[in-house]
Amino acid sequence: MVRAMMDMEPVQEEVGAGPDKSPLYLRIRDVLAESISAGRLPRGALLLEGPVAALFASTRTPVRQAFALLEAAGAIRRFDGRGFLVGQGRSGPKRVMLTSEMLGLDDEAPALRKAPAWEGIYESLEREMVHLSAFGRHRINEVELARARGVGRQVARDALTRLEALGVVEKDERMRWMLVPLDEARMRHLHDIRVALEPVALVQAAPFIPPAARRAMTERLEEALALYPDLSVAAMDVLETDLHVTCLGYCPNRELLIALRRARFMLNVSKHVIGVSHRLPSDEPFIAEHLAVFRALDVDDSGRAAETLRHHILVSLPKIIGRVGEIRQAHRPETPAYAVPVAH
């Protein structure tokens, strides 16, 4: 089983640090897979993102990605929409207290790595920055950000550098941090990149997407369609990530994926806009549109899958623009001490 899991790795950006340069979510996946195979994690044991992330000294995001790969490989199964159970069948749930010993992380083999300090503030900072970007350009004071978050200046700088890679912030000609405004023109420009490149990436990725992974993603969509609109923001984010990040990550053309990296910011916009508005539309067709893409992939019709994906991206733009407009009208945040509006 461990070997099968190794064979289904998509091409992804490197996110880890330390001696092992593989992405952190893959290393977490491998440790969990080995613990399951060795029997240290018993069949039916309940796995939750928070406790597992704590053992690995990581945020929840790489744990969530590791769970998705383990589920696709059949090593774990979803449990009542919250968490996963080890193994298949009807055993469990066994609410065991996870320990470092169960995962082989003892004193001689401690945590996979020491989590970079910036990860501790990143997720909430990204959410705050994306929300604020809907209200125009702001100058970001690195010192004030560090003070507001109770961290050192280097930690604040590292978090901003990560946001810079996504296009959330940039440096001006005087090397000052600036929050890039999320106006309609920018949304359209990023959207144009996705419309042009994501279908091409999907065609190239299609032969390399493992059938087990594809089936797991399809099942998640079917479950979500039955539950909608009773879905969490996190569940919606997983569905978006499945198609637009994980599937496209199997594209062997790394230059194409690099070109798409900045445009992926639009996925963050969707996630954070939903998170602020706390309201899901009564009729959300994106789940059905995603399913149509996977149905085409199931019959090896990558051309139809690509065209379906292209249509899906095209029709999503007016909805995103509309939701950002709602945010501007009803959810204006207090400007944090580290941000100063910049007039044009």
Image: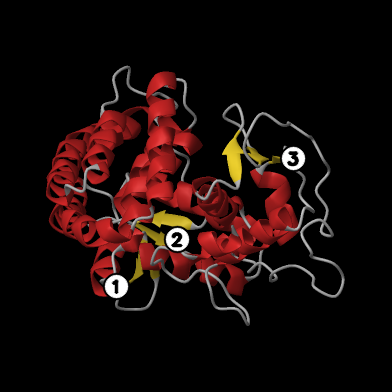
Which numbered disc covers residue 254? 1
Identified by mark 1, the residue type is Arg
Is residue 26 toward the left or the right of residue 43 in the image? left
Which numbered disc covers residue 173? none
Identified by mark 3, the residue type is Ala
How many numbered dots are placed on residues in this image? 3
Identified by mark 2, the residue type is Met
Quickly name the residue at label 2: 8
Q: Residue at x 19, y 44 (%)?
A: 309
Which numbered disc covers residue 45? 3
Q: Is residue 121 above or below residue 274?
A: below
The residue sitting at the right extreme is 107
Q: Quadrant of residue 104?
A: bottom right
Tell me the element at label 2. loop
Q: Earlier in the sequence, mark 3 or mark 1?
A: 3
Q: Quadrant of residue 111?
A: bottom right
